[in-house]
Image (cartoon, helix red, strand yellow):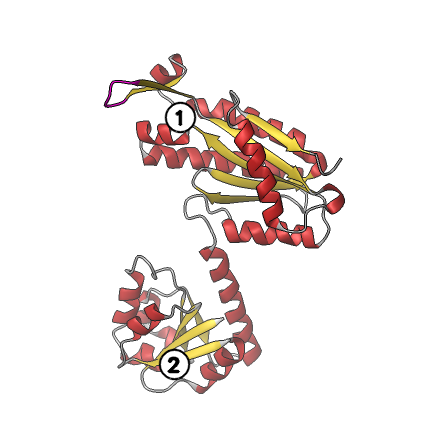
Amino acid sequence: MKTVVVVKERIDPTLSSVVSGLSESMKVIPAGEDALSIIYMDPPDLIFLDPSFLGENDLRIVGELRSNTIYGHLPVVAAYRKGGLRKRASIEIPVDDFLVLDAPELEIRRRIEFISRRALRELDTNPLTRLPGNEAIIRFIQKMFDEGREIAICWADLDNFKPYNDRYGFTSGDEVLLATSRILMNAVKEIRQEEGFVGHVGGDDFVFVCPVASARALCGKIISHFDMVIRNFYADEDLEQGGIVSTSRSGETRSFPVMTLSIAVVTNEKNHYKHYGEASRDATDIKNYIKDLDGSNYMIDRRKAE
């Protein structure tokens, strides 16, 4: 974990001891230096504000950091000495969490560890659906492989999503993605298995994981629910003509059916997968095939298992 501590002149001894003990590298930046430029050149995992800095500065640095579209997500933690939290200004600072340095050192260390883990989760969370993102997906599936779990990994994506976005706008497209995420979450949650997991790779691509024995019924249920719900997102005129009909600038008429769902499933029966990339490659082959079929479909690859 890389950390930065912004101070007035010198770092609080307790904060220095605890943060340096938990960090691979710790950089102390006096407020008189161009702290933002230093942070942007080598972004840390956590930014701490020393009690001396909190007491003496107008916190312009924090405000400018928060307004930055690239680095505004970096977690900022305020460190206080006893009594610092009583000041009304302490709750007006746009930070993500705080430490009380008069607490026992073990308590401070554990709090920093919790903050760090939460920041990692939030960084790898899809901002729209709040589902785990690509890195979390890979970590979960690889963990299942390393533990020798026999699981089904299901890659699901929407067919004809882009024409829908073009016709109805990005706000409506986001609503479709949210609805899809809820369908997946509710279906997987019902199986109540430790292997259950749902992630959002990005765009209209999702991944869910379940026990091998549950895969066929789960995919069928998800597709059935999706096909019923998706019609609510189309105007009656589009439903009557079977989807979106558009005319290009050259006068060519193109038709795009109502959105469907394609699910490519690979299983780790007999533990033949050792790495996430192997499963992803096989799923891509299946997905490329079933996306050319009419309607919503799923296909389970059992070639290696057999």
As helix, strand or loop, the secondary structure at mark 2 comes to strand
Q: What residue is drawn where x is 32% and y is 86%? A: 9
30 displayed left or right of 129: left
Compare residues 245 and 45 and report the one nearer the observer: 245
Circle 1/circle 2 CB separation < 8 Å? no
Position above or below: 103 against 92: below
| Residue 305 image point, x, y percent | 74, 38
Looking at the rendered structure, the kind of residue marked 1 is Phe
The amino acid at mark 2 is Val
Q: Main secondary structure of the magenta part?
A: loop
Q: Nearer the viewer, residue 81 or 18?
A: 18
Residue 197 location (% of width, % of height): 60, 45
Lower sequence index among marks 1 and 2: 2
Residue on which the image places disc 1: 233
Tell me the CA gap for discs 1 and 2.
52 Å
Give the magenta part as a residue range: 248-252
* Disc ID at residue 176: none
Return the x and y of residue 199 as percentages of the image width and height. 53, 45
- Residue under numbered circle 2: 28
